[in-house]
Amino acid sequence: MDLGPHAGFIIASYVLCAITVLGLIAWVRLDQAAQERALKELADRGIGRARTGQDSKS
Amino acid sequence: MAFWDYANPTRFLKLVETVLPWLTGLCVIVFAVGLYLGFFVAPEDYQQGATVRIMFIHVPAAWLCMMCYSIMALSSLGTLVWKHPLADVSAKSAAPIGAAFTFMALVTGSLWGKPMWGTYWVWDARLTSVLVLFIMYLGLMTLWRTMDDPIKAGKAAAVLTLVGALNLPIIKFSVDWWNTLHQPASVMRMDGPSIDSSMLWPLFVMAIAFTLLFFVIHLMAMRNEILRRRVRALRMRAASAAHPGTAAATAQPAE
């Protein structure tokens, strides 16, 4: 596949988009791990959510 | 089960758990098809040559940055008018994603502009209004981080988001209202797209892929925000129990 004389611009565009998307994915995954860790620490200390009737039905 | 039942964060989390793997798989497949079509099936443009392939990421990113802000504006209405428990969570979670898509649109546009226009940047109406959108996203993200109470921050951000929504028609019609270096609309036109179908189809497939990507990350970010509010509420409840007489935790949508 020949990207022509402006190949650098095309490749840079796709690479920068890929980095941005990977950054977004890393952000949500790291944030999820941090929140789950915090919830686990709280649960280990005996601090948990009181189950509501609505929750238990769902 | 009615749609409104998903206002319950616990039910919403269960829905996310079920939907997310399928949505992620579909997103990966559509991206693979879109990239294949964009690089191996779509022809080169007779004027722009291979640089037209930047269009397959630039245009979807630009569409998504506006769609994301539209979703935030609707969510803000949900926060202010209907006080929907997940509306504020949705708006807050969408802001960084919208900022990322706007960044992608600006950078790829700039990289496309240099070989085609001879410049990376020009202060024309379209480029400047999209830059304003990017600054709006950053401002909203900062506002949410500045205030401790997510409910108060959500209301302030909702008002600012709705004011900022005035920028959306300016972005859309900037190329018609002013004389800009940026080309006028070539897909969403009253008389139909002016792009050949051999390029239009890859563009649509990539637009669907970007849209799926947005929803995948948005659902994941919303799940994180619900968990964050749950952690905050539990910590405040624990602190309140340890020190009776101090202020009780503010009621949170994630509770």
Image (tube, coloured by chain):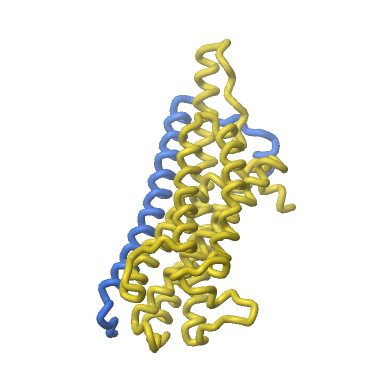
Q: Is residue B83 visible?
A: yes
Residue found at x 42% / y 31%: A41
Query: Splitting the image into 4 quarters, where does residue A12 fall?
Result: bottom left
Q: How many marks?
A: 0
Image quadrant holding the C terminus of chain B, namely top right
Q: Nearer the viewer, residue B202 or B239?
A: B202
Residue B99, percent from left and from top: 45, 53
Image side of residue A36 versus residue B149, left or right: left
Q: Nearer the viewer, residue B63 or B224?
A: B63
Which chain gets the blue colouring?
A
Residue B34, percent from left and from top: 44, 76
Residue found at x 65% / y 42%: B79
Q: Nearer the viewer, residue A44 or B3?
A: B3
Find the residue positioned furthest to the front: B179
Residue B23, compared with residue B88, is above or below; it is below
Which chain gets the yellow colouring?
B
Find the residue positioned furthest to the top: B245
